[in-house]
Image (tube, rainbow, N blue to C red):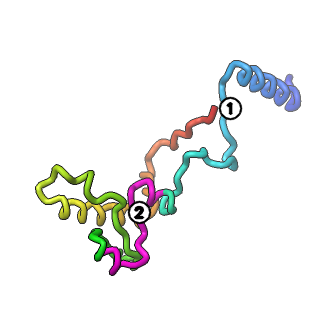
């Protein structure tokens, strides 16, 4: 019968052989997330979805930007570009206002929760 040490040695040899062939090994749960991971609710997340945190709402409105103040947090936001994505709509300002509200709501609502019967999340391997 094979003992534990011999099995561990065989596993290490197999992993080394797979690495030489270019097969990535599974990451340990404590490893850092992928470098392109964006934390939900972070400044990088806001930039990714085109939200800008407004420090002076009065001046921002004077500059012609549509703003939205969250009822949940009291923070004021504007879109990074409120014109280009909505140029083909009959009323681009109305659409920009609705999109701004939706983005703020999604940004502040926290990460989505997975259903209880969902399969485990696929974790891409870094090569």
Question: Residue 105, can we see it?
Answer: no
Viewer-proximal residue among 83 and 111: 83
Query: Dot 2: few (<14), some (14–19), or many (≥20) neighbours within 10 Å?
Result: some
Relative to residue 12, is residue 84 drawn left or right?
Answer: left
Viewer-proximal residue among 86 and 59: 59
Q: Which residues are magenta?
A: 45-61
Q: Position of residue 122 (x, y in %)?
A: 52, 39
Relative to residue 52, is residue 86 drawn left or right?
Answer: left
Relative to residue 53, is residue 31 drawn left or right?
Answer: right
Identify the residue at image location x=69%, y=18%: 21
Viewer-proximal residue among 116 and 17: 17
Identify the residue at image location x=32%, y=58%: 81
Residue 127 covered by magenta stretch: no
Which of the marked residues, 2 or 1, is nearer the chain's N terminus?
Answer: 1
Q: Which residue is mark 2?
A: 107
CB atoms of marks 2 and 1 within 8 Å? no
Q: Nearer the viewer, mark 2 or mark 1?
A: 2
Quarter that holds the C terminus: top right
Local secondary structure at mark 1: loop
Identify the residue at image location x=29%, y=69%: 65
Q: CA distance from mark 2 to mark 1?
A: 34 Å
Q: Which residue is mark 1?
A: 25
Viewer-proximal residue among 21 and 29: 21
Q: Position of residue 30 (x, y in %)?
A: 69, 49
Identify the residue at image location x=34%, y=78%: 59
Quarter that holds the N terminus: top right
The quarter of the displayed image where residue 102 is located: bottom left
Q: Does 100 sit above or below residue 85?
A: below
């Amino acid at each position: 019968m094979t003992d534990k040490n011999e099995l561990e040695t065989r596993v290490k040899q197999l992993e080394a052989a797979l690495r030489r062939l270019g097969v990535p090994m599974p990451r340990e749960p404590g490893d850092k997330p992928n470098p392109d991971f964006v934390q939900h609710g972070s400044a990088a997340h806001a930039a990714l979805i085109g939200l800008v945190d407004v420090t002076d709402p009065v001046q921002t409105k004077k500059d012609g930007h549509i703003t939205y103040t969250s009822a949940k947090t009291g923070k004021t936001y504007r879109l990074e570009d409120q014109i280009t994505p909505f140029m083909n709509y009959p009323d681009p300002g109305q659409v920009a206002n609705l999109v701004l509200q939706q983005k703020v709501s999604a940004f502040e609502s926290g990460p989505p929760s997975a259903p209880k019967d969902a399969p485990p999340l696929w974790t891409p391997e870094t090569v």
